[in-house]
Image (cartoon, helix red, strand yellow):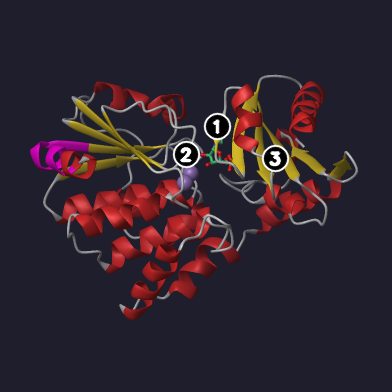
Amino acid sequence: MTLDNIKEEIDKAGTIVIVTHENPDGDAIGSSLAMYIMLKNIGKQVEVIIPEIPKTFNYLPYINEVKTKGSIEKHDLAISVDCSDIKRLNGFSEYFENAKKTISIDHHSSNTMFGDINYVNPVAPATAQILVSMFQYWKIEITKEIGTCLITGIITDTGGFKYATVTHETFDFASWLLQNGIHISQIYENCMQVISKSRFELTKIAVDRLEFVEDGKIAFTYINKEDEKLVNADIGDHEGIVEQGRSVEGVEVSIFLRETDKGYKVSCRSTNDVNVVDICSIFGGGGHARAAGCTLPYSLDIARDKIISETKKHL
Ligand code: AMP
Ligand code: MN
Ligand code: MN
């Protein structure tokens, strides 16, 4: 059983490193930290490496122990959480590649199975929910700190418990946390509700520019580097913009483009039947049926044309 094999590798390892995907979201950070705290609690020598963390997640326990550089080059074991593809480990893939043994724990349907051991459940609403059952199976105590990190991953990846991916296990866990004195509403407010002024201003620009194509079935908007400079945007301030278009009646796919050094990063969300991972995979990206992404190394106009024409084929 894969779960037993994973535990065996953890027990054997002298040094462990945890990594996750670039532009990390709440699930990436929450799952990494939950794994980190759990491993520390059972006495392992472990480090967690995450390049850039949005300030939103400063409330998470042990966030100050996250490193941007590993202290050793070759760990006995590397664990990747919430990452579908080794390319998305970005500049930090070296820690994964150099490790003697590698494990990938994830919920992306597009996972490329890049670890020596892969534990991928594409129907899980968040990697954090996979960790809940994993820790339960191993009979490891889910402390308040671990619970806070896990529920953060679940809340953020389910849009605040609202996506169809939510299962009864999601609410069982939330209920268990409440019974154990964890303030879900406070965590919810921290990761979903409160946004910085810059983030608000950036959203305003994108909403103002939002256009509807194909009889209102596609919502499209973008932000470029200039916009981010104008509002003094911080890491992660673009998160959630794509949800604006998705909420409008009649929209089947919402597309949001953000200028990066590699071109335009695409975020796609769908409301009903369109499988956006199929669209993004064509351009080398991935994700889930209702939320996916890719990067288009072109100018804004060309990127817009390419992603909209491909989306039209899937309506
Ligand atoms: P985003 O639009 O960046 O919030 O991403 C939506 C979902 O697609 C998340 O689960 C991401 O992890 C995944 N995703 C985004 N971009 C890529 C990519 N280039 N390759 C694979 N998965 C991606
Ligand atoms: Mn993620
Ligand atoms: Mn996730």
Q: Which residues are magenta?
A: 7-16
Location of mark 3 (residue): 229
Residue 196, horizontal then vertical, whole percent = 62, 59
Decide: few, some or many residues near mark 2? Use Cα within 10 Å; few <14, some 14-19, many ≥20. Answer: many
Inspect the image, locate mark 3, and give the three-letter code of the amino acid beneath it.
Lys
Per the model, the C-alpha gap separating discs 2 and 3 is 32 Å
Tell me the residue at 76%/23% (across/down).
306
Q: Is residue 281 visible?
A: yes
Secondary structure at badge 2 equals loop
| The residue at label 3 has a CB less than 8 Å from ligand 1 | no
Q: Report how far apart the C-alphas of labels 3 and 1 lie in the structure.
A: 28 Å
Residue 16 vertical placement versus 125 (above, below): above
Please name the residue shown 30% across and 64% down the image. 145
Task: Indicate yes or no: mark 2 CB to ligand 1 under 8 Å.
Answer: yes
Q: Nearer the viewer, residue 81 or 259?
A: 81
Amino acid type at image mark 2: His
Please say whether residue 60 is visible from this viewpoint: no
Q: Residue at left 41%, top 42%?
A: 82
The answer to whether mark 2 and mark 3 are in CB contact below 8 A is no
Ligand 1 near label 1 (Cβ, under 8 Å)?
yes
**Residue 255 on image: x %, y %:** 73, 40
> Residue 148 lies in what quarter of the image?
bottom left
